Amino acid sequence: MSFSSGSCGNCAYLGIETEQPLPDGRTKWGIIIDAGVSLRKLKQALTANSLDFNAIDAVLVTHEHGDHIRHLGSFCKRLGIPVYASANLHEVLSRHPYTKDHIATCRRELIADEWNRVAEAIDVRYFIVPHDAAETLGYTVNIAGRRFTLMTDLGHMTEEGLQYAKESDTVVIESDFDVDMLMSGSYTHELKMRIIQGYGHLSNDACADAIRRFYHKGLRNIFLCHISGNNNTPALAARSASEALQSLSASSEVSVRPLPRGICTPLLTL
């Protein structure tokens, strides 16, 4: 479930539910990726889907920009759940005004190049993606043998990111801007260059190229994230991704869904 995706805030829930309770009585486990929405919005969306804060075992952080960590300090203070990131990113979070006062007791460092157990049946590993932050992480998540990979805020695709996507059932990938809309729009030249020159965001065209490169027979879901409200539309992003799949004669095999800005999706079963 995505609670919001884009410069207005980023936060998503990924979880598993068992048919029978384990010995501790629990049937649901899950993680939050990024903390760019308020606890109030998070609680309302979880409650509407028969979930609560007890279903959240950990938070993964992609990078320190405000639309991804604006409410992370509150998450730490109110929920006290583990926050996972690389050692380098945690050093940044320990000094960041949004997080420095509350993250110390929740800090958990992920071991590089290894699977890290963060909850019952949930293992994660991170990889670096290019973006103009101190360090930006993509994540691949293994839940009971199913693979989920998320890559947001990346200026260009990497071979490592492609390899993880090639092994995943579900991929969340940035499709931030349409090149023509960006270049003809009202942004300053400096901001346009920041977005487009390899360490900003991924365009629809670059996203489509990545899809053609990581598509494989086991791929079932593609979610398009961080779609710009000024330089793109969900329809343009979805059409670009769908055309990439059509060129591979794979459009009937894979579901393509744009994630909305500032709006919660339903709880989707993958």
Image (spheres, rainbow, N blue to C red):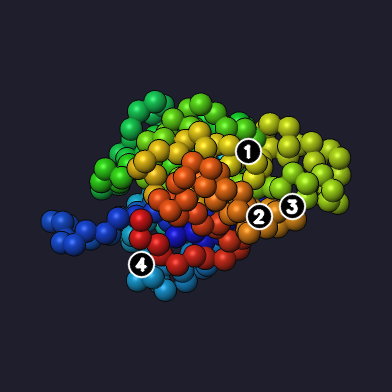
Q: Which of marks 3 and 2 is in front?
A: 2
Query: For mark 4, does the 10 Å Cα neighbourhood hold few (<14), some (14 to 19), or many (20 or more) residues?
Result: some
x, y percent for residue 161: 49, 32
> Residue 206 bears which disc, if any?
1
Query: x%, y% of residue 8?
Result: 65, 57
Local secondary structure at mark 3 = loop
Q: In this view, does 117 lie above or below 78?
A: above
**Residue at horizontal 86%, vertical 44%?**
188
Which residue occupies 45% across, 46% down?
250
Label whose residue precedes the other's in the sequence (2 or 4): 4
Residue corresponding to mark 2 = 236
* Residue 54 placement (x, y as % from top left): 33, 61
Instruction: Using the rendered image of the protein, determine whether residue 264 is visible from the camera's viewpoint.
Output: yes
Residue beneath disc 4: 51
Observer-side mark, 1 or 3, equals 1
Give how far apart the Cα atoms at labels 1 and 3 are: 15 Å
How many residues crowd around disc 2 within 10 Å: few (fewer than 14), some, or many (20 or more)?
some
In the image, which is nearer the foreground, mark 1 or mark 4? 1
Image quadrant containing the N terminus: bottom left
138 with respect to 186 (left or right): left
Between the C-alphas of marks 1 and 4, the distance is 36 Å
Which mark, residue 231? 3
Kindly check if marks 2 and 1 are in contact, taking CB atoms under 8 A apart as contact.
Answer: no
Does the rendering let one see residue 93?
no
The type of residue carrying mark 2 is: Leu
CA–CA distance in space, label 3 to label 2: 10 Å
Which quadrant, please, contains the C terminus? bottom left
Look at label 3 and name its amino acid: Asn
| SS of the residue under disc 1 | helix
| Residue 108 placement (x, y as % from top left) | 41, 38
